[in-house]
């Protein structure tokens, strides 16, 4: 027994000593670099990841940023997130620097968890895959190409409200918003509109989206493990769809221009090479995440803020009813109608200022450089945060006040409003998101007023902001 305790004591001392050595080496490795931004690196390997993620889950993602801006620097501070040394760039100057130096001083970077969830990226890199995808998207996602989809969006929105809202006294908004945006994405990206087939993907995509930016611990029950399992399941379903589409295209049963899947199958790179099924499946997964998760969060908060501000709801209703009255019975929305929704879009923009679906994004330094007087070494990761400007009174006076008039005229100062990022890497789906949000707003206010059932419902960020209980509301049809 004494020998057992002695061995245990020796082992404990050894482990503690090892941890101390690792801790010292970890901090000394950064301390030896000259003129780094001020900040703290946290624990070995983990860094400050837990606090970075937990402040979001507690509903205050800006706290991690603003605490360190106040303590270290309002322009840039150092930390360690997801196992990497990171310089967090703050304010419009930080945004401008990163967005203006894309592929000069910085390049896109995703945590290693992304590469593990999307296997095809490991053959090259997530950065190369992202570049390849961006070459495909501009012609599909620009406003001129998307105009022909507005009627389809309106049709699906009407079906969505008939199936999930009409006749209900109470509904929970977030899962319904996800159903609407996912239905749209499946239709426009894959030509899938059967609700039963769409429903097969919904739950796996929820697991996938919440685990993409997570601590990459692949144990059963972790968010990362659930995301890997979900991606494998979705990929299997998508590959079956891709195989069938190849057959349909060869037999002229499918149109080359009907959706993004057909476009990917028929588009070659500069060397005449076509993407394989795994590459296409992973790219479609990425598009489906981007095409529905961020928009569903934005739509949910539109409903939340319209419930809280009846005067703003009434102004949106007035604008949308003028458009509705100009339409013939059964006539669908079109591009001209979308262009008339100026006030509604200002409201949506103010929603995305206070609850940005994209909280921020990572880059990697491809050269040493100086920013705000501090040295950023090559290989360090960089992070920009929407909240460093969106809730900053320097850029938005009374930042907690909901005020759509901020977006009238010339709108916010350059690089201060960044819900879609900026520069060459600005979200290519911005126009698509604008359309699906406005089509939803038109249909929901035309049918209903509503009130929140949980006035003080907590907001969590995981990795996008969502009401903790999904925003349950009492629905009040206009004809009642």
Image (cartoon, grey):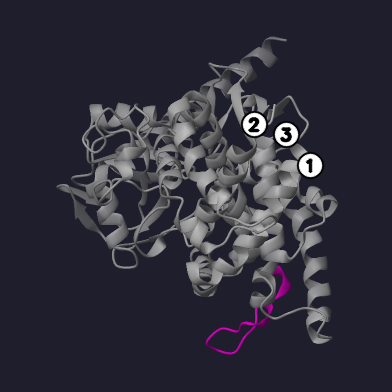
In whole angstroms, how far apart are the C-alphas of marks 2 and 1? 18 Å
- Where is residue 174 drawn, in percent x and y? 64, 35
- Apparent side of residue 240 relative to residue 149 in the rendered image (left or right): right
Asked whether residue 120 is in view, the answer is: yes
- Which of disc 1 and disc 2 is earlier in sequence? 1
Mark 2–mark 1 CB contact (< 8 Å): no
Q: Residue at x 79, y 75 (%)?
A: 245
Q: Which residue is mark 3?
A: 221
Query: Disc 3 vs disc 2: which is toward the camera?
Result: 2
Q: Which residue is mark 1?
A: 163
- Region in magenta: 265-278
- Which of disc 3 and disc 1 is earlier in sequence? 1
- Is 207 placed above or below 282 here? above
Q: Quadrant of the C terminus?
A: top right
- Is 38 placed above or below 179 here? above
Q: Quadrant of the N terminus?
A: top right
- Where is residue 233 drawn, in percent x and y? 79, 53
- Is 452 placed above or below 329 here? above
- Apparent side of residue 392 relative to residue 54 in the rendered image (left or right): left
Asked whether residue 228 is in view, the answer is: no
Q: Which residue is mark 2?
A: 478
Q: Residue at x 27, y 61 (%)?
A: 100
Other residues around mark 1 within 10 Å, as few (<14) / some (14–19) / many (≥20): few
**Nearer to me, 277 or 403:** 403
In whole angstroms, how far apart are the C-alphas of marks 3 and 2? 45 Å
- Which of disc 2 and disc 3 is earlier in sequence? 3
- Where is residue 449 drawn, in percent x and y? 60, 29
């Amino acid at each position: 027994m004494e020998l057992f305790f002695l061995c245990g004591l020796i082992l404990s001392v050894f482990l503690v000593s090892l941890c101390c050595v690792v801790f010292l080496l970890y901090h000394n490795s950064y301390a030896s670099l000259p003129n780094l931004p001020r900040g703290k690196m946290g624990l070995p390997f983990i860094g400050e990841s837990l606090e970075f993620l937990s402040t979001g889950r507690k509903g205050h993602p800006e706290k991690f940023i603003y605490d360190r801006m106040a303590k270290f620097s309002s322009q840039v501070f150092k930390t360690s997130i997801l196992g990497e040394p990171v310089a967090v760039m703050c304010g419009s100057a930080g945004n401008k620097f990163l967005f203006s130096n894309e592929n000069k001083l910085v390049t896109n970077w995703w945590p290693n968890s992304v590469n593990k969830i999307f296997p095809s990226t490991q053959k090259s890199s997530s950065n190369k895959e992202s570049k390849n995808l961006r070459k495909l998207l501009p012609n599909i996602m620009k406003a001129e190409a998307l105009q022909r989809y507005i009627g389809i969006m309106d049709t699906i929105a009407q079906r969505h409200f008939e199936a999930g809202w009409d006749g209900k006294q109470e509904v929970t908004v977030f899962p319904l918003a996800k159903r609407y945006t996912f239905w749209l994405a499946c239709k426009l990206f894959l030509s899938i509109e059967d609700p039963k087939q769409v429903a097969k993907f919904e739950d796996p995509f929820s697991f996938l989206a919440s685990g993409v930016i997570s601590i990459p611990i692949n144990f059963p029950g972790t968010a990362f493990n659930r995301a890997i399992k979900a991606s494998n399941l979705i990929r299997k379903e998508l590959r079956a769809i891709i195989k069938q589409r190849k057959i349909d295209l060869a037999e002229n049963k499918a149109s080359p221009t009907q959706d993004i899947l057909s476009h990917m199958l028929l588009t070659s790179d500069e060397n005449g090479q076509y993407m394989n099924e795994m590459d296409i499946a992973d790219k479609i997964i990425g598009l489906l995440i981007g095409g529905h998760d961020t928009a569903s969060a934005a739509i949910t908060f539109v409903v939340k803020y319209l419930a809280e501000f009846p005067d703003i709801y009434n102004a949106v209703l007035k604008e949308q009813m003028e458009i509705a009255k100009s339409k013939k019975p059964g006539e669908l929305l079109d591009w001209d109608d979308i262009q008339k929704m100026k006030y509604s879009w200002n409201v949506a923009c103010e929603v995305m200022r206070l609850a940005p679906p994209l909280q921020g994004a990572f880059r990697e330094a491809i050269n040493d450089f100086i920013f705000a007087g501090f040295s950023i070494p090559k290989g360090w990761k960089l992070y920009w945060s929407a909240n460093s400007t969106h809730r900053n009174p320097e850029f938005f006076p009374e930042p907690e006040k909901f005020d759509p008039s901020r977006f009238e005229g010339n709108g916010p100062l350059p690089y201060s409003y960044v819900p879609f990022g900026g520069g060459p890497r600005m979200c290519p789906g911005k126009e698509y998101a604008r359309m699906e949000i406005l089509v939803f707003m038109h249909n929901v206010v035309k049918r209903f007023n509503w009130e929140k059932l949980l006035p003080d419902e907590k907001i969590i960020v995981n990795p996008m902001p969502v009401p903790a209980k999904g925003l349950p509301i009492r629905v009040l049809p206009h004809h009642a």
